[in-house]
Image: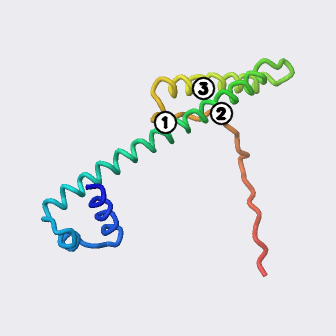
Amino acid sequence: MLAELNEIRRMVADRKRDPEIAAALNISQRGLYKLKERIYEQDKAEWDSKARESLESRALKIIETLEDCYHINKAIAENPDKLDKDRIEASQVMVQAQINMFQLLKQGPTIRLQLPYRVVELPEKVEYPRANSV
């Protein structure tokens, strides 16, 4: 059975049509469809396993980064030499990092995290450099 499935995989990769594959393996088209369904189920199970491993690994890296973000911003928030505005922004980032870690741990690696961000005001008029025309 495994050899037959591998042969079907090879023929599909070689762009053989279903009637050609069925004839080469001396099976009915219906039998071929059942075997292809089994191949699709195997592929889906393998994909799910790999995706889960990848998501879990990536989630751990995200948590490490969020923890770093939290600690860096905690140092800023607790530093009396920093501007009040910077200390407040650092506190906001700390809270968002904690929320993201909580959501990631509770819901798993399928959630969409909101990244902490900083709002920067743009000048009223932005000057763009002009290309020199020759």
Residue at 24%, 57% in the rendered image = 36
Instruction: For marks 2 and 3, give the CA distance.
Output: 13 Å
Nearer to me, 41 or 22: 22
Which one is in front in this view, the residue at disc 2 or the one at disc 3? 2
Amino acid, disc 1: Arg
Residue at 25%, 51% in the rendered image = 38
Locate the N terminus and report the quarter of the image it occupies.
bottom left
Which one is in front in this view, the residue at disc 1 or the one at disc 2? 2
The residue labelled by disc 1 is 112
Nearer to me, 18 or 121: 18
Locate the C terminus and report the quarter of the image it occupies.
bottom right
Q: Quadrant of residue 30?
A: bottom left
The residue labelled by disc 3 is 96
**Element at badge 3?**
helix
User: Which mark, residue 65?
Assistant: 2
Looking at the image, is mark 3 or mark 1 earlier in the sequence?
3
Residue at 28%, 58% in the rendered image = 5
Few, some or many C-alpha atoms within 10 Å of disc 2 (few <14, some 14-19, many ≥20)?
some
Q: Looking at the picture, does residue 31 appear above or below residue 104? A: below
Measured as percent of width and height from the top left, residue 26 is found at 16, 69
Q: CB under 8 Å between callouts 3 and 1?
A: no
